[in-house]
Amino acid sequence: MRRVLGFVDMRVAGGRIDPAAPSRALPFVMDPVISVVVPFLDEEGTLEELHERLVHVLEAEGEPFEILFIDDGSTDGGPRVVERLAAEHAHVGLVRFRRNFGKAAALDQGFKLARGRYVFTMDADLQDDPSELPRLLAALEDRDLDVVSGWKEKRNDPITKTAPSKLFNATVRALSGLRIHDFNCGLKLYRREALEGLELYGELHRYIPVLVHGRGFRVGELSVTHHARKWGRSKYGVERMARGLFDLMTVVLLTRYRRRPLHLFGWAGLAMSSLGVLCLAYLTVLWFLGQGPIGTRPLFFLGILLLMLGVQLVSTGLLGEMINSTRGVERTYTVRSKILPDVRPDAAGDASRLEAS
């Protein structure tokens, strides 16, 4: 059933009320204040309960809301569950990917479709608790933040997940300079402006706080409840950890050196070239002093190698300066279908919610 939030007086025309026109009040649905983005993959057993708990919390806030479920290539009945929810509730939307493209792609699509002033994200496995939303909203406003990231201070996961996570978070803190404890917690709240222009791919969802912090937005964290897994299995393994390491290098480049790549490659190239020149200069002095041939010494080949590597790195930096991020990121995922939350003011709106691509 559509949630009616107000009425439009149809006598209003050209910015003025026409008293001669018949008064006709049509219901309309306001734009959402809170958008919830939930990526899911093979989590059929949690989606209905998650929706119920989210609605309970969101209705208590008293603001218009929408819930966007992003299906990242599920092979179970999860998409059918959300399709049924979307048919019953106008605030529910569903985007289905043609195959599994990863959580970063799912969040990227959700952020592009979300229309709320606040964007709330969480995982679909019910390890995150929807009841944390009011606390996150309060922290965002009271502390004047743009992003509040959840911190699973007491984490209900096996040591095979918690130990690598601690190492990962310590590494990201050291390289990014952002002092939060849990970068990869799915429970986050954003002001919409912090997400504008953000492009996610690969494993970059792990580094969203770093990316928005690098653009000047204020990021904080809040300790949140973390429940043990009841459904499905973890989607993370050694392979994703390796991909995450490579993407961390990308994040450092994007946040620190995106507009000045020569400063990154140039300093490394200059150091290597200088060391190579010193090696060759030392050998040249030995040759002039009559210390024998230098062409067969290992130091000679090391000096040449360092000099060549230095020149290549400087050249790479110069090429980066020329390109300088002028090309946008190509979207690497394809959407199978969309069911968008209904915001049409006419009674026929429900029939137009399905978009196929």
Image: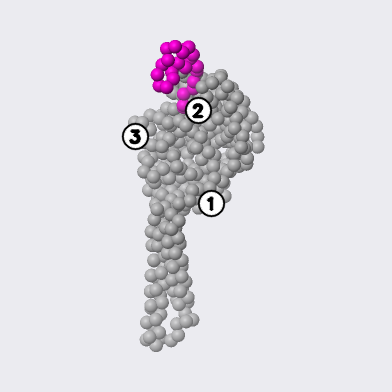
The extreme left residue here reads 143
Q: Position of residue 212 (x, y in %)?
A: 41, 43
Q: Which residue is mark 1?
A: 242
- Location of residue 36 with respect to 272 vertically, above or below: above
The stretch in magenta equals 10-32
Q: Which mark is residue 144?
A: 3
Q: Earlier in the sequence, mark 2 or mark 3?
A: 2
Q: Amino acid at mark 2?
A: Glu
Quarter of the image with the N terminus in it: top right
State which mark lies toward you, 1 or 2: 2
**Main structural element of the magenta stretch: helix, strand or loop?**
loop
Tell me the number on the disc at residue 66. Answer: 2
Q: Is residue 158 visible?
A: no
Reply yes or no: does residue 15 show up in magenta.
yes
- Between the residue at mark 1 and the residue at mark 2, the CA separation in whole angstroms equals 35 Å
The amino acid marked with disc number 1 is: Ala
Looking at the image, is mark 1 or mark 2 earlier in the sequence? 2
Work out whether mark 3 precedes mark 1 in sequence or the reverse, and give the earlier one. 3
Residue shown at the point (40%, 62%) measured from the top left: 266
- Residue 8 in sight: yes
Q: Residue at x 42, y 64 (%)?
A: 314
List the single residue furthest toward the bottom: 290
State the image quarter where residue 50 is shown.
Answer: top right
Foreground pick, 329 / 182: 329
